[in-house]
Image (cartoon, helix red, strand yellow):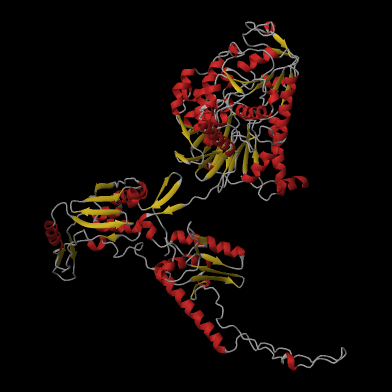
Amino acid sequence: MASKRKASQMAAAPEEPVDPSDELMFLCLGGGNEVGRSCHIIQYKGKTVMLDAGQHPAYDGLAALPFFDDFDLSQVDVLLISHFHIDHAASLPYVLAKTNFRGRVFMTHPTKAIYKWLIQDSVRVGNTSSNPTSQLVYTEQDHLNTFPMIEAIDYYTTHTISSIRITPYPAGHVLGAAMFLIEIAGLNILFTGDYSREQDRHLVSAQVPKGVKIDVLITESTYGIATHVPRLEREQALMKSITGILNRGGRVLMPVFALGRAQELLLILDEYWAKHKEYQKYPIYYASNLARKCMLVYQTYVGAMNDNIKRLFRERMAEAEASGDSAGKGGPWDFKFIRSLKSIDRFEDVGGCVMLASPGMLQNGVSRELLERWAPNEKNGVIITGYSVEGTMAKQLMQEPEQIQAVMTRSSAGGRRGPGGESEKVMIPRRCTVQEFSFAAHVDGNENREFIEEVGAPVVILVHGEVHNMMRLKSKLLSLNANKTNKVKVYSPKNCEELRIPFKTDKTAKVVGKLASIPQPLKMPKFDAAAADGSTTITAAATGPDSEPRIVTGVLVQNDFKMSLMAPEDLREYAGLTTTTIACKQRLRLTAAGIDLIKWGLEGVFGRVEELPEGKPRPTKEANGEGEDTKMVEAADEEYPLNEVVAAYNVMGCVTVRCWTNGEVEIEWEGNMLNDGIADAVMALLMGLESSPAAVKRSSSKHTHTHTHSHSHSHSHSHSHDHDHDHDRALPIRNPHANLDPSERLSRLMLFLEAQFGADNVSPVAEPKIPPLSPRIRARKKKAVSPPAESTPAPESESEPAPKEEEPEEEESEYDTDEEALDLARRTEEAKARELARLHKLGIPVPGVRIKIAEKMQATVWLETLEVESENKVFKERVRAVVERAVECVAPLW
């Protein structure tokens, strides 16, 4: 039992419920615990952003797409494409052409230019897929039809779409790759996509956005915690491997993506060939259907590259201008030792060479065809320079299998691919060498960790990584929390696993228009009313009669996550809205209830009722004692025409009740939720009055009767009197429920308390409660005067004691004179008088009520706040319960 109690005590306290609108929803449709088909959904405050739309390079057809069926794409407001690689952008035509997506699509200018040709080539190459039964998920025409729907934006420019602010920053992965800063309702989300912080020959490396506090960081985890070999060492090892293969008479196959890291490798090879003439006899081929188009794009966007490329561009332009030759106008991308090869049909496969061929995963295309051709020769070599996705031929080849499957239709090593089936597969022996040198332009473990720490986001979401690499990086990041006060939350969601993260934010409304002219409620708890241009602190210290708190009421308008409080008449000017006032009227015909009874009933239910001047004064009867009342009433009725307002009342400041001469009662009010309820109560009251006994008695007709008096005398006489029984039917002059003054309300409260505690035990408190005052003149202490230092003789020896100083005298009293005590007493009385005056102004006749049953059972009730003070806790709670019930019974006190 003890262990159970201990466990229950250690259990975390239940968290407060979170408003669903304050939760950030993150959903991986692809790229969760995997590399490939990246696609992520962000939802916050009713806004939805989609990040990337790729295809998985290891799968074909619909299986390669993200799990679009798990989310309604019609909710997406904005789709952001980080870069043009297949695993990040290839399913975009499908989203635009085949789904109910209705949002807007954004990418950078270089990404859009390359995306057009890359996807077009991907569709064409897909026709030669390794799976003969696969079906293309979209056609080339779908791609061309949806291409105009894409909007291109520049780095460092901020765009607002449906209250979502997006800003792209260089990511350093490939040309045009962008990290996106997304702001939704003040929440800043940074999506890195694939990014690199390594110094590159042509790209600007990724940097943390300056001056922005990031709340959520969504980052890749491709390499987990692995560390790259230094760049210089990698380049040297790469060139040593390439030259080694060439020296033994072999051919070098470097599978690369058509665009991206291929251009970086071309710069490295061209530079090395220029410095080593002995290798210039070996041609370098760049084999891709997009070879020439790729170079045109790279030549166009030199301005989006780093300073190294810009310097080379200026040098080449200067050389071309000096020589009068236009051959160098391509700048740094006009290679001297690189030959573009659009198709291998014209390729003469004779002697050693270096071949950069796409695609990089070796699933099909030129690179797969050359692999099948060159794999059986041990002199040849394959060098993998990019990241290899699980399930692709590039990943399998790194395991150095003895055989590989032939999937291309061309003749390869004496075999062809059969029409299908396991028994008909043609296998090719692999004797070539396989090596890997990472030039993938992804951050390694150290670079990723340093970037995450530099960003300093409290929430980190890991995507785009195989499960083992991702888990290692997550464990590393969580281990860093040990030395941190504010722990970082790290998430690694799987595909289709919904992640909800609460973000509680303060809601602030700006007061505009007429309401802004109302002075701020100063007598409130201390708060900071600082604006962006300065700091001002408003405290509870208030001075003057205008320092009482004020309630500011108005219409709260929300636009683009910004709230404004304004008066209804300012809606058109500040919010662009129009207002409509609904005037409601209802007429009833009351035949029994008279005007006096209606007023009596209204006062009984609603308290004070205001008489409006629009009602005509009624004639008063002159009681002359001569039995002419009936004639006067008839004469008065003749003076009033029909449909005239006899009396008008305002109920609770919002409902007007008018009584007409023909017995009709009109109720008028301005339609809203509160006024409608009060008007319904008024109508129910009037209908009740019509059938009440008082109305029946008041409406009874006048009658004549005779009184006969018999006398003891022989003669008798009789008296006939017409009695108008108005004195029987007359209502009291004053309604006991209307227009109560403070003394009457206090007396009712006292009656209630006396009934509970006894009349002798309840008494009013005469003096108000004020905070203790401190004396303005502090007590002066008399200090002893010591002789000057130079007049004190120094002791001649250590044994001679020094002269003894006089001890200071004690204080005479707390105050020097009685004058100070009198001053304090005078100021205390003044404070009490001011407090009493303030309470009387509020309508409170006495500060409080004291209840005393015994010495240890005393309590004081302060009437302004109904606060109960007592040393006896049980008695205090009892008095508080009685006071609360008393206030409910006697109606509002003040």
Q: Is residue 531 above or below residue 200?
A: below
Q: Is residue 399 visible?
A: no
Give 522 or 408, whichever is nearer the viewer.
408
User: Residue 336, located in which quarter of the rendered image?
Assistant: top right
Task: Tell me residue 518's x, y (percent).
Answer: 39, 61
Q: Position of residue 23 (x, y in %)?
A: 55, 41
The spot of residue 297 in percent (x, y) is 52, 28
Decide if residue 136 is on the left or right side of residue 890.
right
Q: State the residue in front, 105 or 239.
A: 239
Q: Single out the residue that lies furthest toward the front.
A: 323
Of the 4 image quadrants, the one containing the N terminus is top right
For the question of whether residue 695 can be seen, the reply is: yes
Question: In the image, is residue 499 above or below residue 630?
Answer: above
Position of 301 compared to 200: left or right? left
| Identity of the residue drawn at 44% across and 22% down | 145
Residue placed at 50% from the left, 18% from the top?
A: 138
Q: How many marks?
A: 0
Q: Is residue 484 above or below residue 871?
A: above
Of 333 and 452, which appears nearest the observer? 333
Q: Position of residue 745 (x, y in %)?
A: 41, 66
Q: Which quadrant, please, contains the C terminus?
A: bottom left
